[in-house]
Image (cartoon, grey):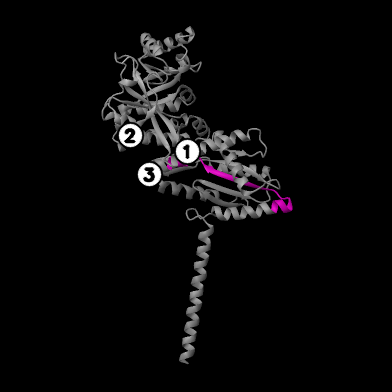
Amino acid sequence: LKRRDEVGLLARNFSELMKRLSGSYRDLEHQATHDHLTGLLNRYEFESHLKQILEQTRNNDEHAVFCYLDIDQFKIINETVGHIAGDTMLREFAVRLQQQDLLPQSAILARLGGDEFGILLPRCDMDSAYKITEAILQMLEGFEFHWDDKSFSVSCSIGVVPINSDTRSSTQLFADADVACYTAKDRGRNGAYFYDQAPDNQSTHSQDISHATVLVQAMQQDRLLLYAQPIADLTRADNAVYHFELLLRLLDQNDEIVSAGHLIASAERFGLMPEVDRWVIDNAFSQIKHFTSHMPEAVLSINLSGNSFSENGLADYVIGKLREHDVDPGNICFEITETSAINNLQQATRFISKMRDYGCSFSLDDFGSGLSSFMYLKSLEVDYLKIDGHFVQDMLDHPIDAAMVAAINQVGHSMNIKTIAEFACSEHIVKRLKQMGVDFAQGYAVGKPCAISDYKKSSSLDSTIPGN
């Protein structure tokens, strides 16, 4: 009897152990196929379903659709209120995507990584996909994410790609979806773009994506560098330099330093410049003592994209970084282009007003390049006008260009705005600008850009200034 009891006990223990192991296996299986943050399928499981659908479309001539969702400007939330808030927003976004009747029951929804989500629509054509994406975008209208005392409008861009017998591979499908999603962002975000498998502008989009990717990866891999170009004060007898414009450089895969200018246009089109500009602001503030330690009156000019200063959170971000790095706002000047200021006039005036009240100054870049320049100038409270360099570089040979430089200089002074002439590429131009009464000159005749770290090696820049 005792032996039978022992056997029974062992059997029960074994049964209990098997139940636990079975439960643990199910847990492990779930963890392997699901995203831990949102509970949705993960990318690995999503790609497994995608491969099955690709086989079905090849063998049965069926149609399906892949929707690639990317939350607009998600990094701004992480930067402003932190990653815990960002994770909370991702969970809320996932919950909204699972609302009843939003997606067909056959839809396969997954978090692909970061702020990217994927939806597979089996046995679906592009017309039906259009209605579904419209429903998603409509559902997100008015979605406000609140954290502490801050509120963020949440939207997403959707790339929609057909899956059919012509679809070559999942890799190609993801690449096409990437192009479509970034095209949606390029067109203003909070929208969908339906991919044409043979668009005329495909190569242009691919190149833009390549450029934008290079810039973002360089930022993530700490391969971006800040260079400074000196600006001479022509109102002083010695043409002293204490003003500098910061320029972005990139350390390429061959460890050579190259300009990032050709990448910035692509990043601008895809709405990536706010992240880049915040990187510049943080790094500029952290390195400013290379200048102010021996030049307390130094002014660093930081270029801002129109996408950046039109965001509600940028002013608070700047103020936070000024405090974090103990930077005097008087040492900071923000440069915005005339075109971006006019295109975002209300946001520009609001940002300028708030930051000038805090002590920063502003420069309006490329002034004179637009026909409406003078009309809008009185709406913008700026401290400096940067005369478009295309007028400056040819002013000695073309009287009309010289007249434009003189006119812009006169208008600026009549409004108590100082003037800076760009593209001062010879000592003769610098001399002529000084005779005309232009306040500052910038160009290779004054000094070439060099790494910020180089400025800590010397307390004097007189050797770069013509006439010294």
Query: In this figure, which residue is indicated by the disc labeled 2?
Result: 287
Find out whether residue 66 is within the magenta segment. Answer: yes
Circle 2: is it few (<14), some (14-19), or many (20+) Cα within 10 Å? some
Task: State the residue in front, 145 or 287.
Answer: 287
Numbered disc in front, either 3 or 2: 2
Q: Is residue 211 above or below residue 21?
A: above
Q: Is residue 138 left or right of residue 444?
A: right
Q: Identify the residue shown where x is 47% and y is 83%.
A: 9
Task: State the residue in front, 363 or 455.
Answer: 455
Numbered disc in front, either 1 or 2: 1
Q: Could you say where residue 303 lies in the image, as x and y percent from the top left?
A: 42, 28
Which secondary structure lies at badge 2? helix
Which secondary structure lies at badge 3? loop
Magenta stretch: give its range.
56-77
Indicate which disc, 1 or 2, sits on the residue closer to the N terminus. Answer: 1
| Disc on res. 254 | 1
Q: Identify the residue shown where x is 59% and y is 45%.
A: 174
Q: Is residue 400 left or right of residue 49?
A: left
Find out whether residue 71 is within the magenta segment. Answer: yes
